[in-house]
């Protein structure tokens, strides 16, 4: 798919690409997810740069970075926090868990039990966590990058649909191309451990508002609704795209258009983004599928002459 990213975002992408060579599209899509106020699920094998992407993206955005390494024996309180008795004061005090971060890396999220995975549900939907009937507001913005190992690996637990649906986008990083990998092997990567903060809180708010104000024409809204309807009525999937998924698709195509310096969405934006929003939400009746197949199945059955 052809696209041209706005020079306005080049410094952000360049800064991260120093540490994740040859992955400009992946970086740009991650930024688009963030500016769309969504959350991102990275599914790939270990060692391709999922943690590197998250760490340097947080640094460039200037957000407080928190990381949770999910394990099979982890409890929800290890994520959310806990009330403990402070003996010298004679009262219970709430100790915040690592979820109280603006930028949270939920690393290898599918290595934890479903009960622990569900600790993220309220936080990702409402930016609030409830402990002992008291609601605590999370820092804003609140962005989660979840990483996931392939399901066939030993010791993993598939994420429930309710959890998957809270991730706006899902994609992998993939292996580097030959030239990029050679540069990596030669040690030609960024010479600093940290990336420099490039955006202020005001900049982030401005870009988020700018993304949400991108225009989506009635013709393209018709096209988008045809896509949504196809997932629900074609009979190919166990269930169609949810309303949350439809809203995610709308927000993400707008944000992707903004990164290209436009204030309007095009059909190519929809074709680019739809598989990334749908892949983890849709299950073919004969089993899981790839984003490429979802793209083909959807777009060969809806009108694209908008």
Image (tube, rainbow, N blue to C red):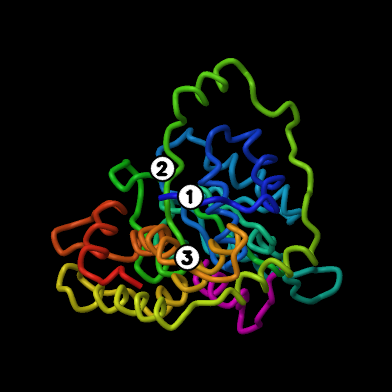
Looking at marks 2 and 3 on the same chain, the residue that comes earlier in the sequence is marked by 2
36, above or below 291, in the image: below
Q: Which residue is mark 1?
A: 147
- Residue 191 figure quarter: top right
Q: Alpha-carbon neighbours of circle 2 within 10 Å: few (<14), some, or many (≥20)?
A: some
Residue 104, horizontal then vertical, whole percent: 62, 56
Which of discs 1 and 3 lies nearer the camera? The answer is 3
Q: Residue at x 24, y 54 (%)?
A: 293
Q: Is residue 116 left or right of residue 286?
A: right
Q: Is residue 302 left or right of residue 96?
A: left
Q: Residue at x 73, y 56 (%)?
A: 63
Boundaries of the magenta span: 119-139
Marks 2 and 1 close (CB-CB < 8 Å): yes
Q: Residue at x 75, y 38 (%)?
A: 194
Q: Which mark is residue 44?
A: 2
Q: Which residue is mark 3?
A: 168
Q: Secondary structure at mark 2?
A: loop
- Relative depth, front residue between 193 and 151: 193
- Relative depth, front residue between 234 and 157: 234
Which of discs 2 and 3 lies nearer the camera? The answer is 3
Residue 154, horizontal then vertical, whole percent: 31, 41
Q: Alpha-carbon neighbours of circle 1 within 10 Å: few (<14), some, or many (≥20)?
A: many
């Amino acid at each position: 798919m052809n696209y041209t990213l706005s020079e306005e975002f080049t410094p952000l992408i360049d800064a991260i690409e120093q540490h994740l060579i040859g992955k400009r599209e992946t970086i740009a899509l991650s930024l688009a997810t963030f500016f769309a106020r969504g959350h991102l699920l990275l599914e790939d094998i270990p060692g391709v740069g999922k943690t590197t992407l998250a760490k340097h993206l947080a640094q460039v955005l200037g957000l407080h970075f928190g990381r949770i390494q999910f394990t099979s024996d982890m409890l929800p309180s290890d994520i959310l926090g806990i009330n403990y008795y402070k003996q010298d004061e004679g009262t219970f005090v709430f100790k915040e868990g690592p979820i109280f971060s603006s930028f949270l890396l939920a690393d290898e999220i599918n290595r934890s039990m479903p009960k622990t995975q569900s600790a993220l549900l309220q936080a990702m939907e409402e930016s609030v966590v409830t402990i002992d009937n008291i609601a605590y507001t999370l820092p804003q913005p609140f962005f989660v990058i979840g990483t996931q190992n392939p399901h066939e690996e030993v010791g993993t637990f598939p994420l429930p649909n309710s959890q998957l649906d809270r991730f706006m986008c899902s994609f992998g990083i993939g292996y580097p191309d030959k030239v990029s990998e050679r540069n990596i092997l030669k040690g030609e990567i960024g010479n600093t451990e940290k990336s420099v903060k490039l955006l202020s809180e005001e900049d982030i708010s401005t870009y988020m508002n700018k993304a949400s104000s991108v225009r989506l024409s009635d013709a393209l809204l018709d096209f988008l609704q045809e896509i949504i309807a196809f997932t629900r009525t074609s009979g190919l999937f166990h269930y169609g795209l949810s309303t949350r998924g439809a809203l995610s698709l709308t927000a993400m195509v707008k944000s992707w258009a903004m990164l290209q310096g436009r204030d309007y969405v095009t059909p190519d934006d929809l074709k680019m983004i739809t598989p990334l929003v749908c892949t983890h939400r849709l299950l073919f009746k004969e089993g899981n599928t790839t984003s490429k197949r979802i793209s083909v199945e959807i777009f060969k059955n809806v009108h694209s002459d908008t």
